[in-house]
């Protein structure tokens, strides 16, 4: 029996998963990209050390983003409100809803992050790592907003939240 990509199970062993450093205080573990799942979803694990700035304010136009906190506590911007998620909490963010995320003050955290339908995000995460290492520019991130469906914007609410220490 043969399987199409959408019918093929995806197994990622933790020791074989690609791990990227997108900042001094955060890691992204690549689990399954859109091409692996027949477009059904994209998944990664995000790990944040205390003080990580997390992800800046942004939105997606084509996918719902889901967050499941594996450990620690996360601050998440939703429109103009900041909510706190603890271990075991789950959140879905529909397309076009502005959001951002970072670990809570004094906390480290890990989250499972899933996009559905899937988006080819792994090259975006690799771009973030190249920017962190000085091998690419922030302008390349801006220029990739349509390709990776990641649209950044300024959020005074989120800037005030990040200033809390």
Image (spheres, rainbow, N blue to C red):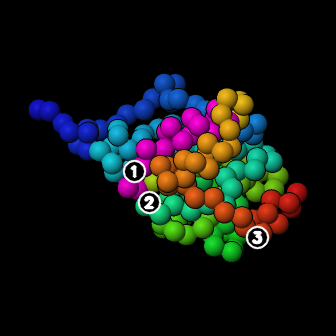
Q: In which image quadrant can residue 133 be found? A: top right
Instruction: Looking at the image, tell me whether mark 1 or mark 2 is earlier in sequence order.
Output: 2
Residue farthest toward the bottom in the current orientation of the protein: 80
Circle 1 residues within 10 Å: few <14, some 14–19, many ≥20? many
Is residue 42 in sight in this rendering?
A: no
Rendered-image quadrant of the C terminus = bottom right
- The numbered mark at residue 118 is 1
- Badges 1 and 2: C-beta atoms under 8 Å apart? yes
Instruction: Looking at the image, tell me whether mark 3 or mark 1 is earlier in sequence order.
Output: 1
User: What residue did someone put label 3 on?
Assistant: 157
- At 35% across and 40% down in the image, what residue appears? 35
Q: In which image quadrant can residue 105 be found? A: bottom right
Is residue 81 in sight in this rendering?
A: yes
Q: Position of residue 91 (x, y in %)?
A: 54, 64
Q: For mark 1, give the secondary structure.
A: loop
Q: In front: 87, or 130?
A: 130
Measured Cα–Cα span from mark 3 to mark 1? 29 Å
User: What residue did someone put label 2 on?
Assistant: 63
- At 75% across and 50% down in the image, what residue appears? 53
In the displayed structure image, the side of residue 104 where residue 142 appears, left or right: left
Q: Position of residue 66 (x, y in %)?
A: 50, 58
- Badges 3 and 1: C-beta atoms under 8 Å apart? no
- At 41% across and 56% down in the image, what residue appears? 116
Instruction: Looking at the image, tell me whether mark 2 or mark 3 is earlier in sequence order.
Output: 2
Give the residues in magenta: 116-131
């Amino acid at each position: 029996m043969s399987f199409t990509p959408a019918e093929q199970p995806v197994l990622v062993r933790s020791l074989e998963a690609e791990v990227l450093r997108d900042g001094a205080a955060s890691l992204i573990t690549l689990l399954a990209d859109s091409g692996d799942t027949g477009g059904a979803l994209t998944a990664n694990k995000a790990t944040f050390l205390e003080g990580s700035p997390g992800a800046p304010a942004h939105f997606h136009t084509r996918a719902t983003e889901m967050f499941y906190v594996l450990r620690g506590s996360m601050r998440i911007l939703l429109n103009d409100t900041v909510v706190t998620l603890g271990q075991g909490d789950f959140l879905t963010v529909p397309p076009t809803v502005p959001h951002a995320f970072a670990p809570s003050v004094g906390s480290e955290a890990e989250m499972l992050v899933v996009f559905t339908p899937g988006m080819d995000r792994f090259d975006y995460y690799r771009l973030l790592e190249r920017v962190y290492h000085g091998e690419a520019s922030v302008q390349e991130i801006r220029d990739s907003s349509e390709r990776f469906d990641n649209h950044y914007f300024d959020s005074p609410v989120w800037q005030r939240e990040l200033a809390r220490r």
